[in-house]
Amino acid sequence: MDPADLDQLLDRQLRALPRPRAPRTLVPRVIAATLDRAGDARAATGWSTWSRGWQLVSVGALMALIAGIWLLIPAAPQEITDATRTAAETATLVRVFWQVLFGPIAVYIAILAVALTLACAAAWAAFEVALGGASHR
Amino acid sequence: MTDAARFEAFVREYQDMVFATAVRLLGREADAEDVAQTVFLRAFERFAEIGPSREAAGWLKTVATNLALNHLSRYRGRWQLFSEMDRDGQGTGLADRLALMAAAPADIERAEQQDRLERALRRLPDHQRVPLVLFHFEEMGYQAIADLLRVSLAKVKSDIHRGREALKKELSIPHGSR
């Protein structure tokens, strides 16, 4: 066949190609996926999913609560103020302890823990392979 | 009609168009079905806006094209081996084969030739099939294709030319010799 004729034939054939049909499974898949998504949306109840109005109300309520506590502290009984002071001192002590002793080596401890975990896992896997091999024999 | 029923009717109306766009770009039905599902999920998220719009078909086609191209660039390397393995298994489904059996001989021959061409199109390497499909089926110009695929105009022209040459070889093979 002449190359030009073949070109025209190809154009005609491409134009005449029937559109591939979607498989019958597509619609049920899409519907199931949308139902899943709708379920996820209903299940999402975090603060970020609240409406703007409720977010503002909740922020206002939180600020009112903090202000109330702040105002009540001077009028609180002696035991409460003592306990608060002790808690603050303990927190400071823990922070200093962490910064001086554990802070600098925390990364190394974490690396060591991960390495030990991996080594244990590898040893266990090797042990299982060895046992499995032995039982096959 | 409820929203769910309206959305289902919307999917049924456009499913062939979306799937056809995806399957011709991707060359694999399983990938095309995944992409089509994602397209409709995007439409579901904006259904209040897209559902009644006259541009719904255009929007769906654009999203299907973009997602199919993303899919090719992201996953195709990993799936190349499998796609090479099962490409020959694709083509006419059982329903199409039964319809063929009931058709007249001339219709059968035409349908078989179309099937051969469709399979040859899907067998083309991605870099030839994608611009060729965009050119012939999505009616995009060379420059638009080059911009979309971020390649040179010369490469688009040469890839389309090579793809057409491969398809022409398929057409010139006499019926029954494969």
Image: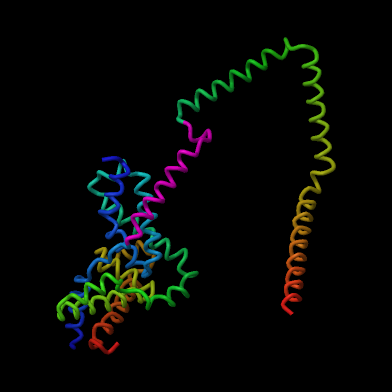
Residue A49 spot, x, y in % from top left: 48, 35
Residue at 84% from the left image edge and 40% from the top image edge: A100
Q: Answer with the quarter of the image where residue A114 lies.
A: bottom right
Q: Position of residue B44 (x, y in %)?
A: 35, 46
Query: Is residue B125 toward the left or the right of residue A97 in the image?
Result: left
**Total labels drawn:** 0
Q: Please, is residue A122 above or below residue B63 in the view?
A: below
Relative to the observer, which residue lies in front, B9 or B42?
Answer: B9
Q: Is residue B89 magenta?
A: no
Q: Residue at x 17, y 83 (%)?
A: A5
Q: Is residue B47 visible?
A: yes
Colour scheme of the rendered structure: rainbow
Residue A70, above or below B102: above
Magenta segment main secondary structure: helix
> Which residues lie in the magenta part?
A24-50
Residue A47 among magenta residues: yes
Relative to the observer, which residue lies in front, B135 or B125?
A: B125
Q: Residue at x 27, y 70 (%)?
A: B95
> In the picture shown, does residue B171 fall above or below A69?
below
Q: Residue furthest top?
A: A75
Give left or right: position of B112 versus B147: left
Residue A60, image x, y percentages: 54, 21
Quadrant into which the C terminus of chain B falls? bottom left
Residue B144 seen in render: no
* Residue A88 percent across, percent down from the top left: 78, 26
Picture quarter with the N terminus of chain B: top left
Up the image or down, B158 lies above or below A36; here it is below
In the figure, is residue A6 to the left or right of A59? Answer: left
Q: Is residue B101 left or right of residue B32?
A: left
Image-quadrant location for residue A27: bottom left
